[in-house]
Image (cartoon, rainbow, N blue to C red):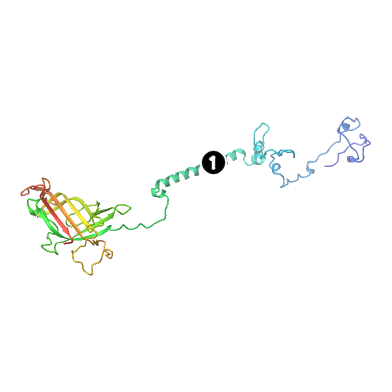
């Protein structure tokens, strides 16, 4: 700025110390009350003003953001707890300097900050809700066993004997027809006894024995399709005479036996009992074993031969509704046959007995 221009005739130079500015020292009071001194005229030229220096980058944090000076403390007492966010405004409000900060106001102010916070909060809530729904759906679709503690995978041990699929080869030993007034109404497959023909008396049963408990100490037996209509399923087996020579697995069930005494006539013996004993030590002797016959362990067929003795019996007693015969018409049941069909007493027995030992 150029020096002020002062009129020489109105200026009286006082006797001042040499170390003062411009060779003299003037106080405001003396300048105002001196009658011979006038204020100098100052000419200002905006174009000639020096440029404002740039702000230093190493300024303190509170000066860079115009947050005011931090509180001062003395060495006699520790400084008070201080945070930038504890700044109080003139009316007691917090964050007044931050709210009025030019940098924040220049970038949108508090509205923009609130909008950003609202968007972030919405995203967080959406993610939380989506995650919760996803986990719930996963729990609903996960098998119950997937919630149980995992254990080392082990291969289940095979069920012990007598579990398996077996062919039980027997012969028709004896036939009784006392429960029927007409002997031809009761018949036993294969319709020849061993005494009539040892080879034609052969009858095979294909049955399946299954373990019914994890400890493999309980078993059930079921039949497969067969030509003499002996059908049953999951009948329990009971072990008898354990540890003796007559140790065996026994079962008993009932079924409706069908016979075909003549062409176009079917007879039904209701509630026929089927009994079976599968020995585990007694030897079999029918049919005569051959050197080429495989053992149970060596057989690769689906149904292995039962290696021990067997006896099977079908039995029913007489009664009012035990035997019923019908004529078959167009593949269906027609009129009931009563000619010659006379009920027998309950003590009169009809039976078919099969075995594979003498």
Name the outermost residue toward the left.
340
Using residue 198 as the reference point, say whether residue 305 is left or right of it: right
Kindly tell me whether residue 277 is visible in this rendering.
Answer: yes
Front residue (pair 35, 127): 127
Q: How far from the left and from the top, in percent, is residue 217?
A: 30, 53
Q: Label 1 neighbourhood size at 10 Å, few (<14), some (14-19), many (20+)?
A: few
Q: Is residue 143 left or right of residue 12?
A: left
Q: Which residue is mark 1?
A: 121
Residue occupying the point 69% across, 41% down: 62
> Is 172 in front, or is 53?
172
Residue most extreme to the right: 15
What's the residue at 14%, 55% (across, down)?
A: 352
Badge 1 element: helix
From the image, which quarter does the C terminus lie in?
bottom left
Quarter holding the N terminus is top right
| Residue 329 in sight in this render | no
Question: Residue 74 in the image: x percent, y percent?
Answer: 74, 38
On the image, which quarter does residue 109 sit in?
A: top right
């Amino acid at each position: 700025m150029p020096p002020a221009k002062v009129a020489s005739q109105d200026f009286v130079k006082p006797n001042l110390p040499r170390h003062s500015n411009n060779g003299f020292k003037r106080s405001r009071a003396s300048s105002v009350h001196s009658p011979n001194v006038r204020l100098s005229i100052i000419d200002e030229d905006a174009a000639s003003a020096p440029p404002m220096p740039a702000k230093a980058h190493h300024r303190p944090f509170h000066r860079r953001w115009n947050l005011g000076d931090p509180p001062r403390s003395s060495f006699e007492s520790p400084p008070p707890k201080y945070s930038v966010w504890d700044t109080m405004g003139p009316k007691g409000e917090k964050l007044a300097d931050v709210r009025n900060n030019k940098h924040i106001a220049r970038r949108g102010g508090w509205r923009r900050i609130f909008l950003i916070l609202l968007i972030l909060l919405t995203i967080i809530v959406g993610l939380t809700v989506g995650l919760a729904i996803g986990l719930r759906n996963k729990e609903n679709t996960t098998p119950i066993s997937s919630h149980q503690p995992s254990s080392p995978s082990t291969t289940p041990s095979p069920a012990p004997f007598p579990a398996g699929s077996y062919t039980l080869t027997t012969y028709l030993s004896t036939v009784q027809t006392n429960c029927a007034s007409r002997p031809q109404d009761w018949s036993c497959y294969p319709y020849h006894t061993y005494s009539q023909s040892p080879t034609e008396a052969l009858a095979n049963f294909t049955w399946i024995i299954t373990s019914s408990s994890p400890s493999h100490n309980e078993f059930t037996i079921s039949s497969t399709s067969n030509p003499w209509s002996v059908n049953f399923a999951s009948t329990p087996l009971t072990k008898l005479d354990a540890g003796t020579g007559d140790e065996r697995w026994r079962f008993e069930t009932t079924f409706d036996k069908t016979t075909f005494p003549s062409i176009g006539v079917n007879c039904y013996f209701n509630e026929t009992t089927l009994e079976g004993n599968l020995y585990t030590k007694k030897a079999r002797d029918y049919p005569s074993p051959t050197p080429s016959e495989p053992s149970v362990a060596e057989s690769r067929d689906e149904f292995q031969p039962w290696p021990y003795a067997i006896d099977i019996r079908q039995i029913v007693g007489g009664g009012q509704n035990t035997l019923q015969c019908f004529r078959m018409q167009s593949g269906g049941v027609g009129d009931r046959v009563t000619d010659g069909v006379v009920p027998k007493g309950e003590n009169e027995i009809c039976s078919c007995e099969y075995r594979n030992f003498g």
